[in-house]
Amino acid sequence: MELSKSDVVLSLAGRDQGMLFFVVDTDGVYVSLVNGKERKLENPKRKKAKHVRKVLRPDSTVAAKLIAGDKLLNSELRRELAVLGREFNVSTKEGSETWQKTT
């Protein structure tokens, strides 16, 4: 699984299990994650890549700003992840994560 900047990932382990994050940086083993609320752009979460699962790579203004390195606000991150969270239904039970698109 290759993770890159602006991917949306689901946390599989830790106290943030089941939460969505944007990837802001990666070095192969570790990824830096932000969601605009608990983990802001000023203080990203450093997590092993094996503890996250790539959900999708959105085509949004937030993703474009992350890739380009433009100024991005934490409120924009929160808004985009809230939309994605409502658009998809996540079910996490004992390590088995399933994402289903809601209609």
Image (spheres, rainbow, N blue to C red):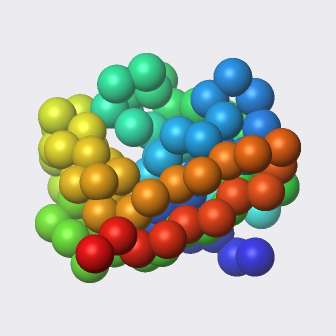
For the residue pair 69 and 91, the one nearer the viewer reads as: 91
Give the number of callouts: 0
Q: Residue at x 52, y 54 (%)?
A: 90
Let me know if residue 77 appears in the view: yes
Which quadrant of the structure image shows residue 57?
bottom left
Q: Position of residue 46 (x, y in %)?
A: 66, 35
Let me know if residue 23 appears in the view: no
Seen in the picture, residue 88 relative to 103 is either above or below; the reply is: above
Q: Which residue is drawn at 44% across and 52% down?
A: 22
Q: Where is residue 17 in the image (x, y as percent from the top left)?
A: 66, 35
The quarter in which the N terminus is drawn is bottom right
For the residue pair 93 and 4, the one nearer the viewer reads as: 93
For the residue pair 53 and 95, the one nearer the viewer reads as: 95
Seen in the picture, residue 80 relative to 46 is either above or below; the reply is: below
For the residue pair 71 and 38, the one nearer the viewer reads as: 38
Q: Residue at x 32, y 32 (%)?
A: 36
Q: Is residue 1 left or right of 44 when viewed as pictured?
A: right
Q: Is residue 3 left or right of 5 when viewed as pictured?
A: right
Seen in the picture, residue 58 relative to 73 is either above or below; the reply is: below
Q: Is residue 56 left or right of 93 when viewed as pictured?
A: left
Q: Is residue 7 left or right of 94 when viewed as pictured?
A: left
Q: Position of residue 14 (x, y in %)?
A: 75, 29
Q: Residue at x 27, y 46 (%)?
A: 82
Q: Where is residue 103 in the image (x, y as percent from the top left)?
A: 28, 75
